[in-house]
Every structure is written in structure tokens, then in C-alpha cells.
Amino acid sequence: MRILVWHVHGAWTTSFVQGGHEYLVPVTPDRGPDGRGRAVTYPWPESVREVPYDRLAGEEVDVAVYQRPHEIELARRWLRRTVPGVYVEHNTPAGDVPWTRHPLADRDDIPLVHVTHFNALFWDSGRAPTRVIEHGVVDPGHRYTGELPRAGVVVNEPIRRWRVAGTDLLPAFAAAAPLDVFGMRVTGLPAALGRAGELRVHEDLPQRVMHERLARRRVYLHPYRWTSLGLALIEAMLLGMPVVALAATEAVEAVPPQAGVVSTRLPVLVEAVREFTADPELAARAGKAARAAALARYGLGRFLAEWDRLLEEVVRAAR
């Protein structure tokens, strides 16, 4: 198939474009949010092709994959026709959560795909035809060494996303072990937290480099209060890292007890970081269990097969 898909979430798209299709990614002159084109920090195959937005009308497109509500209108305007579509909901609902209604809740013509069962449970999806396709992740391999007695954290925009990302909790963890924070717009974080000595930041590294550096840290910390399911968490598990995570959203399903510590109690989590940092053998055992769990649940083959089935259904129904 020829699939129109926007570059919105680089990590998810990296997995999605591993399928056996051609992927058309819009690009605008400013390479802004509606036309970023190909990823720079993620390795995408040659089957991903940039197409200037004003030339999309001349392309054959079998199906569009939407990730933001306004993309539905963008596709109609840029393609100058209507094509079958699927909407992927990456995020947890915001606002008055028990009552948050999805933007597609009043439509029944576009399948709504949630990336976690938590999302499907908490969004009011209305009459939209809904299903769950859990994440699949390209396996980076077991690269864990844990040689550095430090905790690794991956979070984009930790200052803007303060309580959502659990940024305010980092000083408590920094008292148990030095922290390394990887991600976009992390440069000002030590000053914002007043923790220049116990916290280092690594700004927007290529994925391969980030994995290599992250795997040298003794334990992976997932401090998010409210996120769908950070793909960095699954990647860390695949690297072979033990996990310490808040028992929030989908993390309780993703991390089994033998793979680390998941709790809503901050003192329990802080002590877990301290124990893993102090005991390399304990950390390595938990990391092996984490990798096994991630391979079993978030394998790329299952993910791509489920997407192929759905896309075939949508295109067949339109024909």
C-alpha cells in the first residue's frame, strides 16, 4: 500500500514504517509540525518518502493514518479527494478525565486505534469503531552493561511537562542516585531543579547513541504521572535495564514484578533506585526479566501484523 502518515511521534513512526509498504510523509517549506518530513534522529527505511504538501494531489494514496484531528481536513485539502483513513490516539485524555470525549467520538467512518488498553478505557470514544493495537518496538538488542551507578531517565520537554512527566519528583530520586536525563529540551533542567551536581542532561541524541549511553546506566527511572506508555520505557526494557516506575496509566501492565519496582509510593520507588544502583547483580537479573517481558508483549512482528490486518480491512471496505 501507499500510506500517507505525518511525522508526529518519531518513536512510534519508526516502528510503523518497518512494514512492507510505501510511506508518504508530508513536508512543508518550514518543516513545521504539519510537514516535518523524514526523521533526523531516528533510522527510517528508504520506503519512507518525503512528499511536498503541494504535490500530494498527484500521488496515489491508498489510506491515510491520522494522529491529530486537523489532519483529516489537511488530507482532504492536500490530496484534493477523500481516501480511507485510520486515526491513532497516542495520548491519554486531558481535562476532566472521566468525561473526556474523543474528537472522533461522534463519527463512525474512521476507525479509532488506541495504543494502550488504558487509553481505550479512559477515553470516551463514543460511537467511533474502536480497537487497541499495542506498541511494537524495533529491538535495539540486549546492550545493558549497567557499569555506571546512575539512573537513566528519558523525557522530552521536562520543564514544560513538569508534573505530567514527574519532573518535580526528580530531586527525591537524585538523593538516592545521580540522574542522567535524555531527551529534547532538557538543557535547562539542572538549573530549574537546582540539582546541577546530581543531574546531567543529554540533549536530543540520535536514537542509536541514546540507547548506547542509556544502557550504561544501572537502572531506568520512569517518573511519569500521566502518559499513555512512553516508548522509551519499552526500549529501556529491551536494552535489558531494570525499571523503577510510578504505578500510573499503562506502566502497571508493561512492567512485571520481576522486572523492577512499580508503585504509587514515592519512598518505595526512591529506595528501589537506591537498591538497584548499589547491587549490580540484582539490577542485571531484573533487566533480563524486563527484556524478556518486552520481547513477549511488544514485539515488532505482532505490531505490524495487526496494523496490516486493519489497513487491509479499511481499504477493502472503501472499495
Image (cartoon, grey):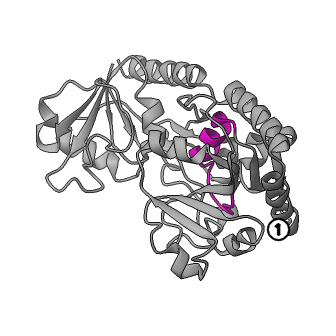
Q: Which amino acid does label 1 sit on?
A: Leu
Quarter residue 280 falls in: top right
Based on the displayed image, in which of its 4 quarters is residue 259 positioned?
Answer: top right
**Location of the C terminus (image quadrant):** top left
Q: Residue 212 versus residue 99: which sits nearer the camera?
A: 212
Query: Residue 317 at what x, y percent from top left?
Result: 43, 20
Point 53% across, 68% down: residue: 158
- Left or right for 93, reference 26: right
**Magenta stretch bounds:** 222-240
- Residue 260 at what x, y percent from top left? 81, 46
Residue drawn at the location 55% of the way across and 66% of the way down: 200
Residue 144 in sight: yes
Which residue is disc 1 drawn over? 266
Residue 50 horizontal/vertical position (percent)? 21, 36
- Does residue 126 show up? no
**Residue 181, relative to residue 68: is it above or below?**
below
The N terminus lies in which quarter of the figure?
Answer: top left
Looking at the rendered structure, the number of numbered marks drawn on it comes to 1
- In this view, 194 is above or below 269: below
Q: Which residue corresponds to the image point at 28% horizontal and 52% vertical from the top-left?
A: 34
Pointer 1: residues within 10 angstroms few (<14), some, or many (20+)?
Answer: some
Farthest-out residue, front: 147
Q: Is residue 271 left or right of residue 71?
A: right
Find out whether residue 195 is within the magenta segment: no
Asked if residue 190 is positioned above or below residue 12 in the image, the reply reads: below
- SS category of the residue bearing label 1: helix
Please indicate whether residue 230 sits to the left or right of residue 28 in the image: right
Residue 98 position within the rendered picture, expressed as x and y whole percent measured from the top left = 70, 62
Q: Is residue 241 left or right of residue 153?
A: right
Q: Is residue 232 magenta?
A: yes
